[in-house]
Amino acid sequence: MIAEDVTLGLHILAGFTALFAGSGAFATKRGSHRHRRLGRVYVGSMAFVSASALVLFVFDPTASRQFLALVAVFSFYFVFSGYRVLSRKRLTDSPAVIDWTETVLLIGAGVGLSVFGATQLLSGAGFGTVMLVFGGIALGFGGTDIQQFRQGVSDSRAWFYGHLSRMAGGYIATVTAFSSVNFTFLPSVVSWLWPTVIGTPLSFLLVRRYRSQFSDGTASS
């Protein structure tokens, strides 16, 4: 099908664009014109990657495409929530309907991934571990968001830490997609999970470093 082939080609192209734009945004000075421009390209590319994954599922509603569609929602959540948090820099800023919507969708994807993963494991498929890990992460972040939306935050720089950690999470998802397609020499579970195993601790350490710098007065937001 020509339409499906074109969509798949554009999906791959957008994925590579996101991979390079994301790395460029992390490498440039935060707040700079180049950082913001690369960030917008990254968000736009990830939006297309996620939307096209859903379209590909419509073309071919197999179990593998269903999994990729759920991962697409999971991945874009990090990027979109990292972008949206910039609109809530003040402690008095409240989440909008779109913020609640993205969180509800994330929780739905988390439930779907968890059920999918449990079913796979019960049938003897080790790949269910990947789905359970992603599902657990989705439910954890979704629950945290709802709690913050309802109770608010007390740290005036919460937006900065949220932006940094969510964009890092989105980039981990981008690298994961690249690894799962290209690192075929690795066991399937490893090719899907190594970016999360390595990237998540690095993300936490980066946020911790900035917290320390802010407390010492050596960094500014």
Image (spheres, rainbow, N blue to C red):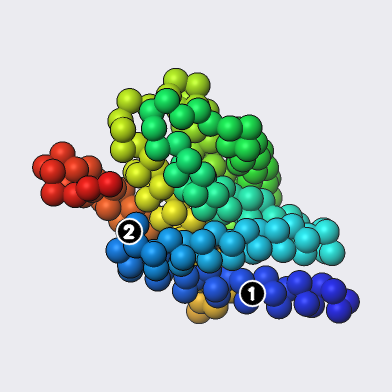
- Asked if residue 107 lies left or right of residue 207, the reply is right
Mark toward the start of the polypeptide (2 vs 1): 1
Residue type indicated by callout 2:
Arg
Work out which quarter of the rendered image holds the N terminus and state it: bottom right
Q: Residue at x 84, y 64 (%)?
A: 59
Q: Residue 115's spot in the image, x, y percent? A: 66, 41
Q: Residue at x 53, y 31 (%)?
A: 95
Tag 1 residue:
12
Residue type for callout 1: Ile
Horizontal relation, residue 181 to residue 159: left or right? right
Residue named by callout 2 = 30
Between 184 and 60, the one lying in front of the other is 60
Mark 1: which secondary structure?
Answer: helix
| Separation (CA) of disc 2 from disc 1 | 28 Å
- Regarding residue 51, the answer to whether it shows in the image is yes
**Mark 2, other Cα within 10 Å: few <14 / some 14–19 / many ≥20:** few
- Badge 1 crowding class, 10 Å Cα cut-off, few under 14, some 14 to 19, many 20 or more, is some
Residue 143 x/y as whole percent? 51, 31
The answer to which of 119 and 205 lies nearer the viewer is: 205
Q: Is residue 148 above or below residue 119?
A: above
